[in-house]
Image: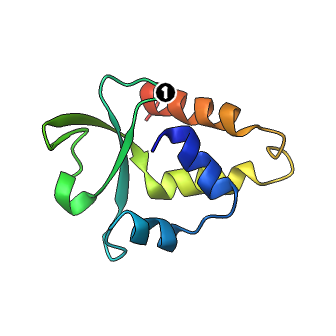
């Protein structure tokens, strides 16, 4: 899954519980983190890990693939919610994806 696909899924009303179930993620986790395959490029594949597995590390290797942490799902879901308000509703999925990606690589 790419970041744009994730944005589309949640902006179209997808539920966090259904997403976690489909990804075999533990809903009881303290936090689920969103990682991107290195090197960081906007169209790279994402991976989702419970913080209990990653220990909060910025980089995480899984099945011989290196991933870098973008942000946690709480931040992402807040951004999706903010994108639904009247002021931000005009943002396209592509624009929101670019904003999230730029935040992750420059500010997070």
In-image side of 74 versus 40 (left or right):
right
Q: Position of residue 83 (x, y in %)?
A: 72, 48
Question: Residue at coordinates 47% horizontally, 30% vertically from top-left?
Answer: 107
In-image side of 90 versus 82 (left or right):
right
Q: Position of residue 19 (x, y in %)?
A: 48, 65
Can residue 55 be seen at all in this image of the molecule?
A: no
Identify the image quadrant of residue 26: bottom left
Q: Position of residue 80 (x, y in %)?
A: 64, 52
Q: How many marks?
A: 1
Q: Is residue 38 above or below residue 69?
A: above
Q: Is residue 13 above or below residue 69?
A: below
Can residue 14 be seen at all in this image of the molecule?
A: yes
Question: Residue at coordinates 66% horizontally, 37% vertically from top-left?
Answer: 96
Instruction: Describe the element under mark 1 as helix, strand or loop.
Output: loop
In-image side of 45 versus 12 (left or right):
left
Q: Is residue 52 above or below residue 8?
A: below
Q: Position of residue 5 (x, y in %)?
A: 56, 45
Question: Residue at coordinates 21% horizontally, 33% vertically from top-left?
Answer: 66
Quadrant where the N terminus lies? top left
Question: Residue at coordinates 20% horizontally, 62% vertically from top-left?
Answer: 52
Mark 1 — residue?
42
Bin the neighbour count of mark 1 within 10 Å (Cα to Cα): few under 14, some 14-19, many 20 and up: some
Colouring style: rainbow
Farthest bottom residue in view:
28
In-image side of 20 versus 67 (left or right):
right
């Amino acid at each position: 899954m790419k970041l744009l696909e994730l944005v589309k899924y949640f902006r179209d009303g997808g539920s966090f519980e259904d997403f976690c179930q489909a990804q075999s993620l533990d809903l009881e986790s303290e936090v689920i983190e969103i990682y991107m395959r290195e090197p960081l490029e906007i169209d790279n594949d994402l991976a989702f890990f419970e913080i209990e597995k990653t220990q909060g590390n910025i980089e995480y290797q899984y099945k011989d693939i290196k991933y870098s942490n973008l942000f946690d799902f709480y931040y992402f879901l807040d951004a999706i919610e903010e994108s639904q308000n009247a002021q931000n509703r005009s943002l396209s999925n592509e624009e929101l994806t670019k904003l999230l990606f730029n935040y992750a690589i420059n500010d997070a």
